[in-house]
Image: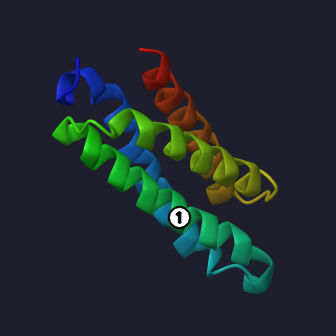
């Protein structure tokens, strides 16, 4: 049950989410009021780091992968909520993929 093939879809979501979060954080630094974007940038970076770690543990078939999926879903949901507050395109895109990644991670908890 554990291993790459079992986790493949979730790994793909996590890697995509990490990339989009990195893009969002970088784009936020170009906004007029960067201070207003500080929480968004921080959550983007935390989410990307969590998603990368989660994808790696899943690909290794780690016995901790399911537990980490739960944490990843929580971080993705927090990032989605924050990014959803901002109207710019990169934040809206990030909010959407974070929601999708959280859903994929939550599915691992019931599989």
105 to 37, vertically: above or below: above
107 to 79, vertically: above or below: above
Disc 1: which residue: 46
Identify the residue at horizontal 26%, vertical 48% (top origin): 56
* Location of residue 66 in the rendering, given as x and y in whole percent from the top left corner: 39, 33
Q: Picture quarter containing residue 38?
A: bottom right
Identify the residue at horizontal 47%, vertical 65% (top origin): 22
Quadrant in the picture for the N terminus: top left
In the image, is 57 to the left or to the right of 43?
left
* Location of residue 23 in the rendering, given as x and y in whole percent from the top left corner: 49, 64
Identify the residue at horizontal 57%, vertical 63% (top origin): 44
Please, which colouring scheme is shown? rainbow
Quadrant in the picture for the C terminus: top left
What is the tally of numbered marks visible in this picture? Answer: 1
**The residue tagged with tag 1: helix, strand or loop?**
helix
Q: Picture quarter containing residue 14?
A: top left
Q: Nearer the viewer, residue 106 or 26?
A: 106
Q: Picture quarter containing residue 55?
A: top left
Identify the residue at horizontal 48%, vertical 28% (top origin): 104
Q: Nearer the viewer, residue 101 or 19?
A: 101
* Location of residue 42 in the rendering, given as x and y in whole percent from the top left corner: 61, 72
Label 1 Cα neighbours within 10 Å, binned few <14 / some 14-19 / many ≥20: some
48 to 71, vertically: above or below: below
């Amino acid at each position: 049950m554990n291993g790459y093939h079992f986790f493949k879809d979730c790994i793909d979501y996590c890697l995509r989410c990490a990339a989009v979060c990195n893009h969002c954080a970088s784009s936020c630094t170009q906004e007029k009021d960067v201070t207003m974007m500080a929480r968004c940038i921080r959550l983007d970076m935390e989410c990307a780091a969590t998603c990368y770690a989660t994808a790696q543990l899943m690909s290794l078939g780690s016995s901790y992968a399911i537990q980490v999926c739960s944490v990843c879903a929580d971080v993705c949901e927090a990032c989605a909520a924050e990014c959803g507050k901002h109207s710019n395109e990169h934040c809206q895109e990030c909010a959407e993929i974070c929601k999708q990644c959280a859903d994929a991670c939550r599915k691992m908890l019931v599989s």
